[in-house]
Amino acid sequence: MVALDTVDLRIDKGEMVSLVGPSGSGKSTLLNLIGGLDRPSSGDVEVDGARLAGISDDELTRIRRDKIGFIFQFFNLLPTLSCLENVSLPLHLRGWPAAKIADRAKELLTLVKLDKRMEHLPDELSGGERQRVAIARALSVYPPILLADEPTGNLDSSTGAEILDLLRDVHQSLNATVLIVTHDRGVAEACPRRIALKDGLVVKDERG
Amino acid sequence: MKLIKLISWQYARTHKLRSLLTMAGIVLGVAVFVGMHTANQSVMAAFSKTVNRIAGATQLQITAGEAGFDEEVLERVQAAPGVRVAVPVIEAVVNLNLRSQSNILILAVDLTGDRSLRDYTLEEGDDTVIEDPLVFIAQPDSLMATREFASANQLAINSKITLDAMDGPRTFTVRGIMQSSGLTSAFGGNLAIMDVYAAQKVFGRGRKFDRIDLAVNEGEPVAAVQARLGQMLGPGFEVDPPSARGKQFEALSSVYGAMANLTSMFALFIGMFIIYNSFAIAVTQRRSEIGILRALGASRGQIQTLFLAESALLGLAGAAAGVLFGLLIARGISASLGEFLGEIYGVAQRADEIASDPKLLLGALAMGVVTSLIAAWIPARGAAQVDPVRALQKGRYQILSAGENRVRRITAFALLGVVVFCLFFTQNRIAFYGGYFLTVIAGLLLVPTAAAWLSKALRPLMKTLAPVEGTLAADSLIQSPRRTSGAVSALALSISLVIALGGMARASYDAINEWMRVAFNPDMFLTATQNITDRSFRFPVSFADAVREAPGVRVVQLVRNGRLQYNGGPVMFVAVEIAKLERESFLPAVEGDSSTMYKRAAAGEGFILSDNFAQLYNVHLGNPLTLNTPNGALTLPVVGVVRDYSDQKGTVLMDRAVFIKNWNDDSINIVRLYLQRGVTVEATRQWLEQRFAGKTRFFIFTNRDLKAYVTKITDQWFGLTYIQLFVAVLVAVLGIINTLTVSITDRRRELGVLQAVGALRNQVRRTIWLEAIAIGVVGLLIGFLFGVVALYYTIEMSARDFAGLRLEYTYPWGMSAALWPVILGAALLAALAPAEQAVRGSLVESLEYE
């Protein structure tokens, strides 16, 4: 089965782009390829000057770790770790010193307005709060690229709107490149560039 | 059956590795059981086969323990009513230093009567030798060999063989080579026939025989003749059918048999936890499947039956594989086991064939199935109780509810209360073993709680060591007590076994070393055989007189030891000059007053018992002890008990004069020499070799040689028990692999997230390795605690029911320290494959895994 076919796409630094399309159109696959979670059977992906084809798993992980922040529909927080520990996770993996990690994680949780919930476990938070933690975790290593897969898909509309605002703030304040896969027309419309996929092909790419 | 095919088979197919690991516990347990028992049975069967083939048409055999008896007994037996033919026999196993280097069984008979009991058809040789036995007897250097032995050693008619006889080397001539028959296949074909009167000289028997073989008159009931002869000869003689010798050997090596049982039972017991763990996890993972089945109308009974049937099939497959492996193990070890048992018990035999007993194999299959069913019983019941609505909801199910844990704790403490009560009645066998069993159950019930506590305690440490990997590994244990408690239990039980056996080994070594320091303090030992436990050859008393002439010899002690029957069991007797013993190697009395004990025993007023004899037969200071001698029953009081480790079945020490008087035997097995200060062992050795070379067969052991020999035998014995440790550790490692395999499936999404947010492969591997190490640490700590109790019970069991050895309770700290790297290394090894599995595969699928 072909998930993506002849996709030729360039996203510039600092852009905020939405990826839309019906189920099975290939949008999540595209996001996974850009994020280095998956590898294309042919073709190549270049992220911030680094070509992903043919590189080892560990090199791919390093690119992911240094350049990309992920936000998932189901948050994918580790249930046994507190909010602070979840946000600290990528920093530990990069070998940051402990004091610097704590400062950075606290700063990010304050940024996403969870400074009062730092020691709570994910199970003790609402869906919106969990997604905020996930966003804080994604931002922890100052990634130039943020990839979000249905970031509001598991939230009610008002919480979804809050999360979208947060993503826009992040985009503007950090000048990060943001790519959002979504089914939500409102989220898609809120992005300056919108790409539509169908049956593995780009069928629309509009700006403004 | 349909459900099994549709549901269980599919599950097993998709979880091949786990199914194999689950089965591995049963395979190992059954393999050890079948292997050790079949090897043991093969040795027993080889011994019995040799006995039966040598017996020929013999219906009854008369013996007097190992002491032998005078020639006049033969005349009385031959004249007894109902006896058709009675012939004298001497039997010995010797090494002839021939090409094949095999030991040979010498059967010395009186050919004048023997041909009516045994078939000696020759394929080559001078038939007149056999046709007219007088010719054979007239040439006392005659020997008949089997075709097998002759071929292996390139012997032909008139070949010469030199045998180290008691009175110096003697040359024998092969006068006949026997046709293959029942007799010639005895002892693996390594058999030679000699004249019994020549053998008396060769083996130093004086005018004694080892045995009389007889057949009764036609129509005469064998039992009637047996009873009549028993009455006529008195209690010092055993009159039994040949098959009884096999039973005696079995009784002699019963400690080995008990140990084989213990090893396999323990392996199965630990294997049971692996199965329990696997099924408990399978029920958890398949809860939605169970929910669907329940929603579709399956009853609780059907669900329970489904899981039990799965476990029965798994058990059957595992047991079948275990039986095959066990037979292979038996094939590999039976020959060396035969030699080893020969060295320990002084009874030589050759086990060249495997004797597989269908009953044992069927029993092993049943054992595998039953173990598997017991292990799966609780998870199967759990599966039946799954609520279909809850089962179809997503959520975590691994956490033991607080209520469930509390029930376990309360039950455990109630059981421990019963155990404490049992401790007051340990004299009672049921209270003792019941107490041990309940302690194990209570300990196992407390494992999940203890494992959770210890994991929580380890978390800060692991977080400090590796902030991400350590924390996640500790959390994995804390969050999934169901998953980890089976592996931790198996590991803890294995470690407790290691501690118990290690502690017992340490205590035994200490006790044996202390005993050897005192009892084996002569400078030199002279023996008539190469192996100190073998008593085929004996010195005449005149040898000791000649040894006394050696310059620089301060004391010469004469020892005669051997086996005799006491209360139906084989025990060791040691006849020694007690007064010299008191002076030279004073063993203090553990029952009675030492000075009185030696004084009375030296005066022939009583027996001194080894501690294990007193324990095993419940005979203590002041009790009368009756031994059967060729002169009738000899009853003397027990004048003291000492710590003596000469024999597993117990030892009776008596003064040499008592033995000579009652057994009519003044021969010697061992001469103990104490040298004067300044005289070297080497100088004495040279003098003895010059004095006796070519005149008397003898072997010299220095003090160091003998201690090294005893230490070697002890090492071999404990080497055998270390099989238990190997099996236990292996089974525990399988448990860890099983748990980790499940753990990485459960944590697939978590590990995927870890990689998605930037964990390198090595960092993911490390979290799995750390989880294994954490299981190892928790298992070690709980195991050490279990070990404290297991060591107490093992030492008690050894004292009460196995070897009667009273050992000091010494916790093996050194071994505990050595276990850390062994177990943590094994845990790390167990984690390698699961860790690789964790880093392979699709990251996208992991992130979507539910």
Image (cartoon, rainbow, N blue to C red):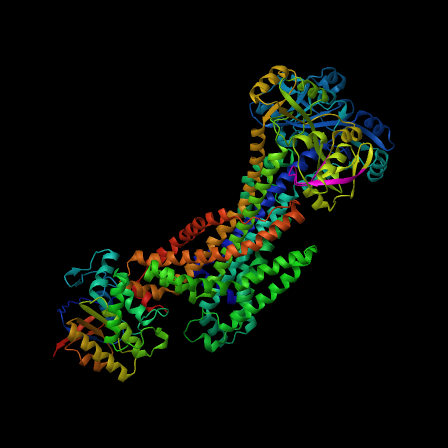
**Is B224 placed above or below B757 here?**
above
Quadrant of image for the N terminus of chain B: bottom right
Number of disc labels: 0
Q: Quadrant of the C terminus of chain B?
A: bottom left
Percent position (x, y) of residue B655? 74, 32
At horizontal 54% and vertical 59% (from top left) the residue drawn is B313
Stretch in magenta: B635-653
Query: Would residue B640 be counted in the magenta stretch?
Result: yes
Q: Residue furthest right?
A: B81
Residue A183 magenta? no
Task: Give the residue displayed 27% in from the left and 82% down from the top.
Answer: A159
- Closer to the camera in the image, B400 or B603: B603
Camera sees residue A135: no
> Percent x, y for residue A148?
24, 72
- Residue closer to the observer: B271 or B476: B476
B113 with respect to A27 (left or right): right
Of all residues shown, which one is farthest toward the bottom?
A158
* Residue B688 location (% of width, % of height): 62, 18
Q: Residue at x 46, y 71 (%)?
A: B287
Name the residue nearer the viewer: B843 or A169: A169
Q: Position of residue B194 (x, y in %)?
A: 70, 22
